[in-house]
Amino acid sequence: MLAEIKGLNEECGIFGVFGHPDAAQLTYYGLHSLQHRGQEGTGIVVSDGKTLKGVKGEGLVAEIFTAEAVAELTGSAAIGHVRYATAGGGGYENVQPLLFHSQSGSLALAHNGNLVNANSLKHQLETQGSIFQTSSDTEVLAHLIRRSGFPHMNDRVKNALSMLKGAYAYLIMTETELMVALDPHGLRPLSLGCLGDAYVVASETCAFDVIGAEYIRDIQPGELLIINENGLTSERFAMSTTKAICMMEYVYFSRPDSNIQGINVHTARKNLGKRLAVEAPIDADVVTGVPDSSISAAIGYAEAAGIPYEMGLIKNKYVGRTFIQPSQSLREQGVKMKLSPVRGVVEGKRVIMVDDSIVRGTTSRRIVKMLKDAGATEVHVVISSPPIKNPCFYGIDTSSKEELIASDKSVEEIRDLIGADSLTFLSAGGMVEALGQDSGYCLGCFTGNYPTEIYPDTLQYYYQRG
Ligand code: SF4
């Protein structure tokens, strides 16, 4: 599904390199392959062993970094970030990596995820005299590190991390070290790889493939990796950990060529589709998927159901952010820019339309209508995840609860609203089973059971926006 029309957005992607002469250039390519995780801002900070310097801006990776800008970022270590702004809002000052200079040295931070106790920590820190440069929750870690009383940097970082609650994959860079930390539930994906003698770290393994790096392993929940000229050491900052990786990474966010916790995302989606065919057998002529993220699940459904998979919908890949969108009246006349039905495939056919999720329902309604206008005699919508009834507090912008169509409507009511002939969601149990591991996932937005405590100020923020 198309993120920008769906109302479901990942907040960030991070990439880091240590020990390579082309660190900034590799980071540029790595960020480019993580662009789907955030399109509103991007930055790279590089270290030459003595100083940290960076370039950042609001826009896409290819827009912000010219060849000249990257060439000026000389050094053998770098961290980079792509951002989709929600918590803390947008604006240049919130584009990461955040860079802090002080008499005791410099620090750069890149964060993927969302802290659930950021507001209370911020309040405490401000009472103690901290002045925040940004409205992003990421900056809290920099202040906690700076205020920690431990003499060694590693201990200061561990001490600071132990105060954070929520989802965080952090890259922390000083002049001489790259530190990599993952929250005690491992809510966001983060992997370690190598390129010759250099180490690389990325939100998704697709970033390794693009630079020819070799995957080593995933970062473990509660782990702090320290990479410096002596090599790599692994320490723990949280002893009690329970793995709960975001299920939506498999269902929707990550690229199909990435592997998360040893499971390939395309294969995971195919298995979700296969399971759906068992849970929702439908008599139809063709199966089609909503591009791009639902194609794998549609292929799986078709394979298991023995019904041909066809390309019933086409996405126009060249509709950029600056494209002049049709006005309401032109839209009503049928000007559709992002998705088009393939009349030759769907005309006179009973169509099973596979999608990964339904957020507000408006997009599903539009696509069902599009298929029927193109001549489909029946449109059966099957969704490769359960209804999203609750907001996400961990870095996925799932809209406020009021905007989630499934928060107060039954499946039959949603079917009626989107105009489908039938509507089926995958069961939560079926989804977990299809992935082949019976635990270790966050299902908070589906079930309402979150892996962490949710703080009252966070709840207030989520229930008031919208
Ligand atoms: S609540 Fe949903 S979107 Fe958020 S981390 Fe959990 S599974 Fe992912």
Image: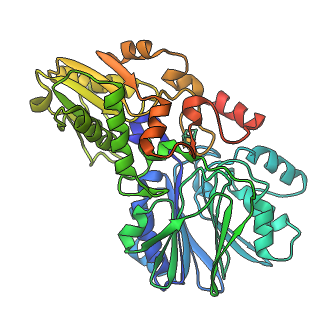
Residue found at x 36% / y 26%: 279
Judge whether residue 24 can be spotted in this image. yes
Q: Quadrant of ligand 1?
A: top right
Q: Residue at x 28, y 35 (%)?
A: 301
The image position of residue 333, as x and y in percent, is 23, 22
Q: Quadrant of the N terminus?
A: top left
Left or right: 310 in relation to 98: left
Tell me the quarter of the picture where residue 454 sits.
top right
Residue 317: image location, x then y, percent: 27, 47
Q: Residue 102 versus residue 342: which sits nearer the camera?
A: 342
Where is residue 273? Give x, y as percent: 33, 37
Q: How many marks?
A: 0
Q: Is residue 321 visible?
A: no
- In the image, taking residue 285 as reference, residue 189 lies left or right, namely right
Q: In front: 466, or 254?
A: 254
Residue 38 versus residue 300 in the image, above or below: below
220 above or below 395?
A: below
Quadrant containing the C terminus is top right
Question: In screen coordinates, is 21 left or right of 418?
Answer: right
Where residue 26 appears, x then y in whole percent? 44, 75
Q: Nearer the viewer, residue 15 or 334?
A: 15
